[in-house]
Image: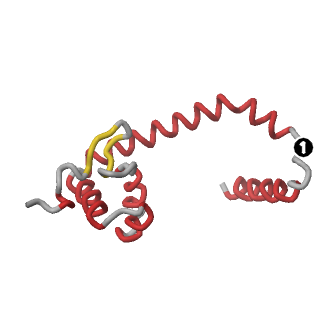
Amino acid sequence: MTSPSHSPTAIIRTERGLTIAGTRITLYDVMDYVIAQYPPQFIQGLFELTEEQIGAALAYIESNRSEIEAEYQQVIRETEALRQHYEEQNRERLAQIAKQPPKPGTEAAWEKLRAARAKRQSVA
């Protein structure tokens, strides 16, 4: 009998892509952490996976590394294209919102946000 971590149905293709069976977690989600060299136990805990599920995901990634990396890069490109599309689509609306004065009682929070943005931009 085949162990669950080596079951061919442990990783399935859904409309979201290659997915860990019984979850909504894609291998592309896991790849972010694999590429960053997080330990398997961390990834397992982060996504609340069983040992069998994380084992199956990591084994599948290792066995099909070039295919997974190609799909992962495609997912990243599509995500960036969507982000740019919605940023452009909402640019005018966001500018209108930014011009509005803060709601009473939220001035300190907005000032903290502005300072954090300015700091982040000066670092970049």
Q: State which quadrant residue 109 falls in.
A: bottom right
Q: Nearer the viewer, residue 93 or 104?
A: 104
- Give the x, y percent position of residue 101: 90, 43
**Closer to us: 123 or 38:** 38
Q: Is residue 81 above or below residue 41?
A: above
Q: How many marks?
A: 1
Closer to us: 119 or 104: 104
Residue 26 position within the rendered picture, expressed as x and y whole percent measured from the top left: 37, 49
Q: Which residue is mark 1?
A: 101
- Label 1 CA crowd tier, 10 Å (few <14, some 14–19, many 20+): few
Q: Position of residue 31 (x, y in %)?
A: 37, 55
**Residue at (41% x, 52% y) in the render:** 29
Q: Quadrant of the N terminus?
A: bottom left
Residue at the image point whose x is 32% and y is 65% from the top: 50
What is the quadrant of the C terminus in the image?
A: bottom right
Residue 3 coordinates in the image, percent (x, y): 15, 62
Q: Amino acid at mark 1?
A: Pro
- Residue situated furthest left in the rendering: 1
